[in-house]
Each structure stands twice: as C-alpha cells, then as structure tokens.
Image (spheres, rainbow, N blue to C red):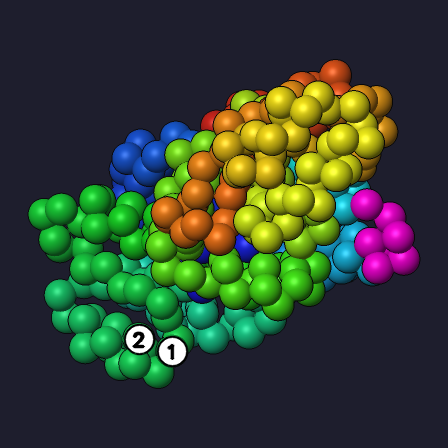
Amino acid sequence: MSFPLFRRPGSVVFLDDDPDYLDMLAMVMPKRWHIRLHMRPSHCIHSLHREPPLWEIDAWNQQQMVDQWRQGAPLIPQILGYWARSQARYALTRVVVVDFSMPEMDGLQVLGELTEWQGSRVMLTGQADEQVAVKAFNRGLIEQFVPKQLPDMGKRLISALETLLTQPHARHSQTWRATLKPEQHALLRAPAVQEALSDFAATRWVEHVTLGDPFGILGMDEEGNVSWLQLEMRDGLAALAEVAEIAGVPEEGLAEIRNGRKLVSMELRQALGLDGPSDLIPAFSPGGDPALLAAVFQIPAAQLPAPITGYREWLSRQEARKVED
C-alpha cells in the first residue's frame, strides 16, 4: 500500500569521520529535519543501541490503544492523549547515513553492529567503494547508497532520505490496520484512492493515523493543528443521516447527507464528548472513487483533551546542529 496508514516525523543520524563534511551536511539538510551528527563510529553505535527499547515502548503504547479500543474505549481521545504526552517519539531515529570509508571501522561494520535497530540504512561511498555498496544493496544490508563524488550529491541524498522518511513503518501500520474492516481496507487499497490520500496527507499533515472506528484519518500539521478527514462509504450515508436526524440536523441537511454532498462528524464529536451535531462539511471523492466520500473537520485546540506540542515547536527546542563527538 503506497498510502501509509501511520506516519510521523523522525530523526536522521549521520556518521562520517570528516568534521567539515558533517558541517556541510548540517547546512544543506532541510531545516524541517531533526538530525544528529557523529564522527566516531563507537559513539554513533552506542547512541543507536539505546533506541530499540524506546521503539518497543512506543509500539507497546500504540498497541495498548488498540487493545483499549477493543474493550470499548474510543480511539480518537487516546491518540490525542498520546500525541500530547509522547513528544520523545520525534527523536527516534528513522534513518542512519554512514560513510563507508572510515579509519576506525568501515560503514558496513558499523551497520553490522545495529542488528536490533529498526530504521533504514544509507551508505555514502567514494568512487572506489561503489562495488561494495552495490553488493551491500543487493544483499539487503542497505536501502540506498549515494556516491559522495557526484556534483549533485546533496540533492541525491536529500531525495533518498525523503523517500525513506515517508515510507510507512511496517509494525505501526500493522497495529492500526487491525482497526479497519475488510471493506474499508479494500477501499484504501484502490490505486487512485491511495494516490489522492497520499497527496492530501503530504500537503496537510506531518503526522497521521488511519482508523476504522470511526472510519477516517486523524492528522496533525507541523504547528500542532489537528484535523479529521472523515471517510464514509456511500452505502452508509442513509445510516449516517439517521444518526444526524436524532442529533437534530434539519431535513435540508439530511438530504445533503443522503445524496453525498455533505458529511457530518457525529462519531468524532461523540468521541470528544461534545454536545450537538457538528457543521455539515462539503464532501469529495478521494481519487474520484464514487464508493468513498471524505470531508475535513478541524478540531479546535479548545476541544482537545490536552494541549499538544506541534513538531515545529518541538524542533525549535532541540540543540543546534553540531558534531557530537
């Protein structure tokens, strides 16, 4: 599935024995990324060795939310609470970039020490190292390699990292896939729907979770603003209108729900403990699929269970980029 059911920012670690090269990387890498810079392989390995238990705790927290949902607890307040209290999730390293040729130990030896670490691996190579990198790639030891001598090396590296940072995390995606009904999952697998939702998420959010109950995507932008993309199957519009009628939506609005022109977020408001129906929001069909409708509902900060620190604010609190050893 090209559309990730779960996505969030993560850190990038660079390892190179040349401090000037690391300083150059610090300047050219996008400012929206959290990066750490290492000169010594042993320090880099030690830093990444501390992360697997943190990944396990984070995965356990997410699984707990799904388990609580199975026992009747709504998912949306749980996710909002998780976002509010778990800012350290942004610091978990998604990608490590290592130089192959280093005096203390080469890049493949470094990566060989990271057997428990879950992220993606990129190797920087000199002209004499490319055959080694090709063999490492073919053996699945690295996801990408980038020759350092290329004139557009910076752009190539950023492009490779962008691809890896946007790839879905398999374990987290599996956790949240369990909340989807088979027919919901089938709709999300349609190529046109995947492309449309991927484009929507990429332009609006830095973090999102896809849910089956209620059906939709809870997302947050870099400023910490939260919104809900409600997804409705067309054959469920009559039932949605019935619930809206009980909540007091007038007949004119009910007709717009039944014909798929507008949606109302009854389950969202119920999950947040809000009284009365929400506004009717114009609907659209992601990817032009007539079987699926969507509408965007903003969640004001005052309606959140707890204040949430956005990714940009978290990033501003981190230390300035510098070589750590």
The crowding category of the residue bearing disc 2, from other C-alpha atoms within 10 Å (few below 14, some 14 to 19, many at least 20), is some
Where residue 84 sits, quadrant-wise, is top right
Who is closer to the viewer here, 33 or 258? 258
Question: Where is residue 59 drawn, in percent x and y?
Answer: 70, 59
Kind of element beneath mark 2? helix
Disc 2 marks which amino acid? Answer: Phe
Pointer 1: what residue?
140
Residue lying at 53% horizontally and 69% vertically, measured from the top left: 114
The mark tally for this picture is 2
Which quarter of the figure is the N terminus placed in? bottom left
Q: In the visual, does 284 lie left or right of 157?
A: right
| Residue nearest the observer in this picture, 314 or 116 | 314
Q: Is residue 244 visible?
A: yes
Classify mark 1: helix, strand or loop.
loop
Judging by the rendered image, the residue that carries numbered circle 2 is 137
Indicate which disc residue 107 carries.
none
Which residue in the rendered view is the most extreme toward the right? 71
Taking the spot 68% from the left edge, 24% from the top edge, the residue there is: 251
From which residue to which does the magenta span run?
68-74
Q: Of all residues shown, which one is farthest toward the top?
A: 302
Residue in view at x 60 percent, y 38 percent: 258
Based on the picture, tell me whether residue 321 belongs to the magenta stretch.
Answer: no
Q: Amino acid at mark 1?
A: Gly
Front residue (pair 313, 258): 258
Describe residue 198's horizontal placement relative to residue 86 as left or right.
left
Does residue 281 sit above or below 62 in this rendering? above
Q: Is residue 71 magenta?
A: yes
Q: Are marks 1 and 2 in contact (CB under 8 Å)?
A: yes
Percent of width and height locating residue 281: 56, 26
